[in-house]
Image (cartoon, grey):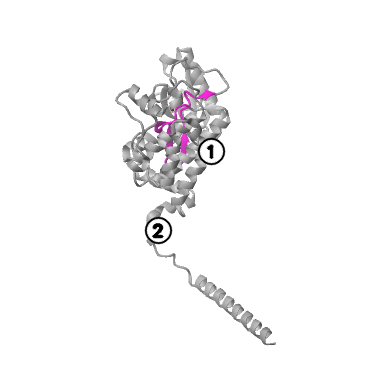
């Protein structure tokens, strides 16, 4: 059977389908690496607006170089078909992870939120908007990496919008009140969307619901939602306040920037990490939800992250046994210090007497 090729990529299998394309896993044999290839569906490739949007996604990706944003390698046009070649993230999106295990532990939600906030700050610094922040657009790799993806409806704040006037862009549950009111979609609107996602991560439910889209939008514009700790009492109060501040109806009352929110989430996570690396917590989460690293790949993780192997039980584990030489050296050092202190005391006493 002939191998399907796109540029230097050899397609191996289909990963998933969405409204804006089909995503494949592929290999680049010359470079020895896996990549993801997103193909614009044939029916959409005939539509100029969708083609421009697909190209724009590639350009947006290419302009953003950040560890928490999926990297882009190439944009290919071949026989009236369009392909976007990106970094391959071996893992699962947050939506799938919640489906398989329910809400995230608060510390994991804070770590993920902080990394997404950093990515958003990078996006905003480049005068761009993602416009579709939600769990399905954030990947968590088997290596504990957080990756923001899917810039299909991203917008350059300095360029003309390809969206028809009056058409809402984004996922309904994550749209901010000002967007529903027809006002400008900006960085504050994305902080709202991230707040909705964080609320969902720690509670397992969305803050705003409705029987239909109309009642959902009314609930969002009113801004009334069950307090985080009312739904999930295990969430630390500081983290709960950070999430709830994202969801204030007036944009000026939210966090001033994604960077400020990210810094607060890092503080929230740090209070519970103790001696553990943030990546270790995420590795533990992936392990628990069926996405643990194969044993052969564990050596690729930094040794500091592998403290996950003792995790919560570390407090009750005995201290590591020291060698005889080390015990002797420590005892000698203690003796020398004690003798020095005694000599200093005698010298002081003789000085006083004289």
Residue nearest the viewer, comparing 174 with 299: 174
Q: Is residue 327 visible?
A: yes
Q: Is residue 143 visible?
A: no
Circle 1 crowding by C-alpha within 10 Å: few under 14, some 14–19, many from 20: many
Q: Secondary structure at mark 1?
A: helix
Residue located at (39% from left, 28% from top): 222
Residue located at (47% from left, 30% from top): 250
Q: Quadrant of residue 351?
A: bottom right
Q: Indicate whether residue 311 is drawn in magenta.
A: no
**Residue 161 screen position, x and y as percent:** 52, 18
21 lies above or below 335: above
**Residue 36 screen position, x and y as percent:** 45, 30
Residue nearest the viewer, comparing 199 with 254: 254
Q: Along the horizontal axis of the image, is 231 left or right of 304?
A: left
The disc placed on residue 314 is: 2
The disc placed on residue 259 is: 1
Residue range of the region highlighted in magenta in the rendering: 131-156
173 lies above or below 99: above
**Residue 292 screen position, x and y as percent:** 38, 44
Q: Along the horizontal axis of the image, is 147 left or right of 337?
A: left
């Amino acid at each position: 059977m002939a191998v399907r090729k796109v540029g230097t990529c050899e397609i191996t299998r289909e990963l998933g389908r969405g409204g804006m394309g089909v995503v494949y896993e592929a290999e680049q044999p010359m470079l020895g690496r896996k990549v993801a290839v997103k193909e614009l569906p044939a029916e959409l490739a005939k539509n100029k607006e969708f083609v421009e949007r697909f190209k724009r996604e590639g350009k947006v990706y290419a302009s953003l170089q950040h560890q928490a944003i999926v990297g882009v390698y190439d944009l290919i046009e071949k026989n009236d078909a369009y392909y976007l070649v990106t970094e391959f993230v071996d893992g699962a999106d947050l939506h799938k992870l919640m489906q398989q295990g329910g809400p995230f532990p608060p510390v994991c939600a804070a770590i993920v939120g902080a990394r997404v906030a950093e990515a958003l700050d990078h996006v905003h610094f480049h005068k761009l908007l993602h416009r579709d922040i939600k769990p399905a657009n954030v990947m968590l790799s088997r290596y504990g990496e957080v990756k923001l993806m899917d810039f299909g409806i991203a917008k350059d704040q300095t360029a003309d919008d390809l969206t028809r006037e009056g058409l809402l862009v984004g996922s309904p549950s994550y749209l901010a009140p000002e967007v529903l009111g027809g006002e400008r979609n900006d960085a504050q609107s994305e902080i709202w969307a991230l707040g909705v996602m964080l609320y969902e991560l720690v509670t397992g439910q969305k803050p705003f619901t409705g029987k239909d889209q109309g009642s959902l939008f009314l609930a969002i514009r009113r801004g009334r939602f069950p307090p985080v700790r009312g739904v999930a009492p295990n969430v630390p109060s500081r983290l709960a306040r950070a999430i709830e501040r994202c969801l204030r109806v007036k944009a000026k009352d939210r966090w001033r920037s994604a960077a400020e929110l990210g810094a607060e989430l890092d503080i929230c996570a740090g209070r519970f990490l103790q001696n553990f690396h943030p990546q270790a917590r995420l590795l533990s989460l992936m392990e628990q939800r069926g996405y643990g690293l194969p044993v052969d790949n564990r050596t690729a993780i930094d040794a500091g992250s592998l403290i996950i192997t003792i995790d919560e039980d570390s407090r009750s584990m005995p201290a590591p046994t020291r060698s005889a030489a080390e015990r002797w050296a420590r005892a000698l050092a203690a003796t020398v210090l004690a003798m020095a202190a005694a000599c200093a005391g005698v010298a002081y006493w003789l000085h006083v007497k004289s």
